[in-house]
């Protein structure tokens, strides 16, 4: 017996990216291996912007995507503009003081 499968996956909408200067400065200072992993994670976010955790309160509207590389947790903060289909990359870093610094930067 042969079953026919239908593709029920959602069509992927590739969002374009924009980045705050802080994100670009931080990324530029990273080792090559981590820079390429950040690029891969940004591609995943552009394919599905809801992949990160949406923050509340002071950071409402901000999404944070977490990923590990070499046993270390890294966080990538971004905004999503559904109408323009743009992902704006805000900040990148380790967990220590990440949210405090992000709040201060967005004021």
Image: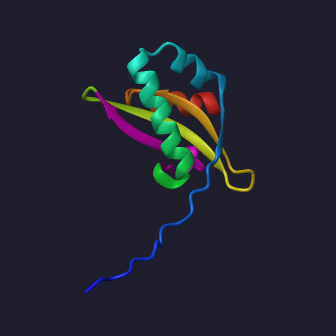
Q: Residue at x 52, y 40 (%)?
A: 43
Q: Residue at x 54, y 15 (%)?
A: 28
Query: Which image quadrant is residue 32 in?
Result: top left
Residue 63 seen in this snapshot: no
- Residue 25 in the image: above or below residue 53: above
| Front one among 79 and 1 | 1
| Front one among 58 and 24 | 24
Quadrant location, the C terminus: top right
Query: Which image quadrant is residue 71 in?
Result: top left
Quadrant location, the N terminus: bottom left
- Residue 24 in the image: above or below residue 89: above
- Residue 22 in the image: above or below residue 47: above
Q: Residue at x 61, y 49 (%)?
A: 14
Q: Residue at x 75, y 51 (%)?
A: 84
State the scheme by which the image is colored. rainbow
Query: In the image, residue 76 lies at what x, y percent?
Result: 48, 35
Query: In the image, residue 36 lies at what x, y percent?
Result: 45, 25
Residue 48 seen in this snapshot: yes
Q: Which residues are magenta?
A: 53-69
Q: Residue furthest bottom?
A: 1
Query: In the image, residue 79 lies at what x, y percent?
Result: 61, 44
- Residue 91 in the image: above or below residue 44: above
Q: Is residue 64 magenta?
A: yes
Query: Which image quadrant is residue 59 in?
Result: top right
Query: In the image, residue 54 lies at what x, y percent?
Result: 51, 52
């Amino acid at each position: 017996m042969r079953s026919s499968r239908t593709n029920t996956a959602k069509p992927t909408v590739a969002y374009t990216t924009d980045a705050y200067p802080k994100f670009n400065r931080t990324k530029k200072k990273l080792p090559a291996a981590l820079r390429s992993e950040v690029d891969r994670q940004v591609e995943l976010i552009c394919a599905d912007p809801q992949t990160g955790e949406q923050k509340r309160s002071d950071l409402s509207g901000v999404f944070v995507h977490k990923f590990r590389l070499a046993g270390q947790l890294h966080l990538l903060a971004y905004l999503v503009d559904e109408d323009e289909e743009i992902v704006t990359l805000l900040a990148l870093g380790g967990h220590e003081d990440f949210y405090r610094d992000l709040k201060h930067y967005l004021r």
